[in-house]
Amino acid sequence: MAVIVSGASGELGAMTVAALAERVDPRELILVTREPERLAHWRDRGADIRHGDLDAPETLARAYAGGDRLLLISTAAVGPMRQRQHRAVIDAAAAAGVPHIVYTSSAGIHPRNPCFVIPDHIATERMLADSGLAVTILRVNSYADILVHAIAPQAIATGRWIAAAGEGAVGFVAKRDVARAAAAALTDDSHAGAIYEITGPELLTNRDAARIAAEISGCPIALIIPEDAPVPGIAAAEQEQASEWIGPFTMADLQSFDRAVRAGYYAVCTHHVEMVTGAPATSLRTLFEAAADARRAA
C-alpha cells in the first residue's frame, strides 16, 4: 500500500505524516510538496519525496503515480483559487489511478452557513462525489490550537478575551487529533464512503475557554462580547487579537465565522475521533495544561 500526503510539509501535513509513520513503514509513504527539501528527514527514513504544486496542475499526476490513497488537505486559499486547487488534486488523482481520497472538509456544512469557508468545502465535497473515486470526508471543527497558542496568551497578558462569537458553542478539536484521524482513515479500507465529524470531546463556548485559561494560568480574564457590550478601543483590540492567527484571511472572513458560531453551525460534538483512531479526542483543558507546562519549562 502506498499512501500519498499532498501538502506534506505544511503543519497538518507534517503531523499526519508523523501519525502515519506509527501505522505503516515510512517506505510506504509518498510525500508531495512544493518544497521537497523540507522533507529530507523523511527521505532518510525511506519515504518517497516528490515535487507537486497545486498551482501547477501538470506536476500532480506524476507526483501521485503509484498511490493507493491520497490525503487532500484543504488549502488556505479562499474562493475560486481554493476550488481550482482542489479540482486539480482530484483530477490528477483520477488520472494517476489513485482509487481513494481522504479530504479534510469543515464542520458546519450547510448552504445557509454564513462562514466564508463553507462554499469551498461544499463545492469540493460535490467534486469528490462526482469523481467516481472512493472518498472519506473528515469534517473538521474549529482548531483548539488557535485558542491555546494565539488567543489565550494575549488574553492572559491583557486580561481580556474578546469573543465576537458570543455564547456560541464549538466542538474545538486539537490539530493532532485531526492528523491521527486522517492517518487512520488512510490506512484502513473500512473508512471508504464515510463522513466523520472530527471534533473535540465536548462543546465549549469562548466563555468556557476563557475560564479554563484563567484557572490554569492563575490570571483573571474577562470575556468581552463586542456586539453586546461595546468597550472603548475594543475594535482595535479585537483586530490585535485576531492578528495572532488571522493568516491569509481578513477580519470580514473571521467575522463570518463568528456569525456562524453564534447561529449554532459549529455546535457539533461527536466521538468520531475515538471511533476512527481508537483513542479519545484531547480536551481543551489538556491542551491548555500542556501549553502552560511548556511555558514553565522554557
Image (cartoon, rainbow, N blue to C red):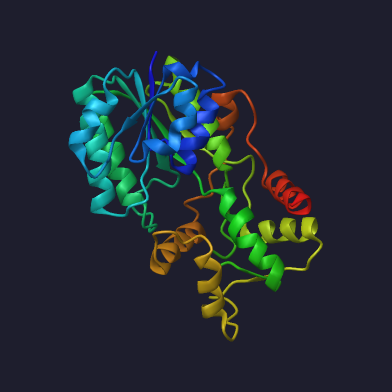
**Position of the N terminus by quadrant:** top left
128 and 50: which is toward the camera: 50
x then y, percent, for residue 48: 38, 23
Lateral position of residue 190 relative to residue 267, left or right: left
Q: Residue at x 17, y 35 (%)?
A: 58
Question: Residue reaching furthest bottom?
Answer: 232
Question: Residue reaching furthest top?
Answer: 1
x then y, percent, for residue 94: 22, 25
x then y, percent, for residue 54: 27, 41
x then y, percent, for residue 145: 58, 49
Examine the rendering and report whether any part of residue 130 can be seen.
Answer: no
For residue 175, which quarter of the picture?
top right
For residue 19, which quarter of the picture?
top right
5 and 229: which is toward the camera: 5
- In the image, is residue 291 above or below residue 235? above
Q: Residue at x 57, y 84 (%)?
A: 233
Q: Residue at x 39, y 66 (%)?
A: 250
- In the image, is residue 250 above or below residue 269? below
231 and 41: which is toward the camera: 41
- In the image, is residue 51 above or below residue 146? above
Number of numbered tags placed on the structure image = 0
For residue 205, which quarter of the picture?
bottom right
Lateral position of residue 98 relative to residue 289, left or right: left
194 and 277: which is toward the camera: 277
Examine the rendering and report whether any part of residue 252 can be seen.
Answer: yes
Q: Residue at x 72, y 47 (%)?
A: 285
